[in-house]
């Protein structure tokens, strides 16, 4: 799957992943009204509104970007109906030819980790059949339980030719409380980065590993160090746009070949119509606003990479 992701990044010229992180406050009133008219103000109504909202965005951007990243918590808050919307979204994105990164941040050990890996990337035994469940192409994983939590995912990645992105240095302000702590004189995130490179050596694609890393755009200098420590790991970069990251902050995350990183924007794209810059589109044309936000992001990153 990493080979396919790299191929699609080359084809689109857009190292961008759109975060499908729906919140009810982002969904235009006309979509909510239609869903509530059919299902009432219920969890089913909320799930329908989320699904229709996502579908509109995907229809507007699928030809521009290589990948999407639905954040499962935004769906889980609506219970089973939310998970149904999550599954519909994953399936639809794959039908449109998009690579799907499940932002699930799983991290456990033993049979529990195995079950998470199977649920999101593998196949589960049902009688004599092996069936996929959520069936994303990649999943995000928390490494802080050690190799016991990672190896079940590596096994499934090898079997299914899928991938993971391991949390190394996250974009949130308090990430340094743990991730920056010095261990034998070195920050913890560097040690985790070295383990990512080690794990990734067991799961190589043609140019890059199935094992990638999550490193926030809000820490560009740390990105420079981690890029050097993980030369074959694709870096998933959150924090662009709404969290303050911009194209100029991203250059260190890329290798000299212009590859090696994929940058995420969530509400900066899916809720673009609510920004002053894109207000002219209005709620009725929210998906067109999202498309324009993708085009602007693509240009911003391209200019930064040319100028480095």
Image (cartoon, rainbow, N blue to C red):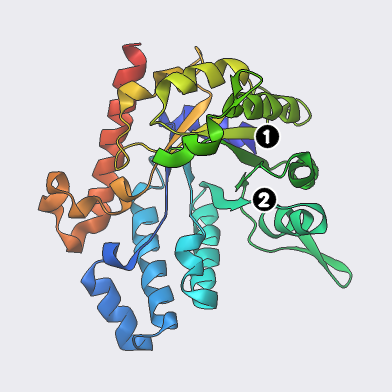
Q: Which mark is residue 278?
A: none
Q: Quadrant of residue 36?
A: bottom left
Q: Which of label 1 and label 2 is nearer to you?
A: 2
Quarter of the image where the N terminus is located: top right
Q: How many marks?
A: 2
Query: What SS does tag 2 mark?
Result: loop
Asked if residue 131 is positioned above or below residue 259 in the image, the reply reads: below
Residue 65, visible in the rendered structure: no
- Residue 40: give x, y in percent of width and height: 35, 88
Residue 4 is left or right of residue 112, and the answer is left
Q: Earlier in the sequence, mark 1 or mark 2?
A: 2
The residue to which callout 2 is attached is: 107
Image point 44% across, 81% down: which residue?
Answer: 44
Residue 287 is left or right of residue 105, and the answer is left
- Residue 127: give x, y in percent of width and height: 87, 73
Looking at this view, is 225 or 177 the one in front? 177
The residue to which callout 1 is attached is: 210
Image point 52% across, 48% down: which residue?
Answer: 97
Q: Residue furthest left?
A: 280
Q: Quadrant of residue 164?
A: top right
């Amino acid at each position: 799957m990493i080979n396919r992701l790299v191929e699609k990044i080359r084809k689109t010229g857009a190292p961008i992943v759109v975060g499908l992180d729906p919140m009810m406050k982002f969904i235009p009133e006309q979509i909510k009204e239609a869903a509530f008219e059919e299902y009432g103000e219920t969890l089913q109504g909320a799930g329908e509104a989320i699904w229709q909202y996502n579908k509109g965005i995907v229809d507007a951007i699928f030809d521009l970007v290589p990948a999407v990243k639905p954040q499962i918590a935004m769906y889980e808050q609506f219970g089973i109906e939310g998970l149904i919307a999550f599954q519909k979204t994953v399936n639809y994105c794959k039908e449109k030819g998009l690579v799907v990164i499940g932002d699930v941040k799983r991290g456990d050990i033993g049979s529990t980790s195995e079950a998470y890996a199977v649920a999101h990337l593998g196949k589960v035994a049902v009688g004599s059949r092996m069936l996929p469940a959520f069936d994303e192409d990649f999943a995000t994983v928390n490494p802080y339980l050690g190799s016991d939590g990672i190896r079940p995912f590596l096994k499934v990645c090898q079997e299914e030719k899928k991938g993971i992105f391991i949390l190394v240095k996250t974009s949130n302000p308090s990430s340094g409380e743990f991730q920056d702590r010095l261990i034998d004189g070195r920050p913890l995130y560097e040690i985790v980065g070295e383990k990512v490179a080690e794990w990734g050596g067991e799961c190589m694609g043609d140019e890059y590993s199935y094992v990638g890393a999550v490193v926030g755009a809000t820490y560009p200098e740390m990105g420079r160090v981690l890029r050097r420590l993980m030369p074959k790991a694709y870096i998933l970069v959150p924090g662009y746009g709404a969290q303050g990251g911009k194209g100029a902050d991203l250059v260190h995350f890329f290798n000299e070949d212009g590859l090696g990183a994929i940058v995420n924007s969530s509400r900066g794209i899916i809720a673009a119509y609510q920004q002053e810059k894109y207000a002219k589109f209005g709620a009725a044309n929210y998906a067109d606003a999202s498309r324009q936000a993708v085009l602007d992001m693509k240009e911003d990153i391209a200019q930064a990479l040319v100028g480095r």
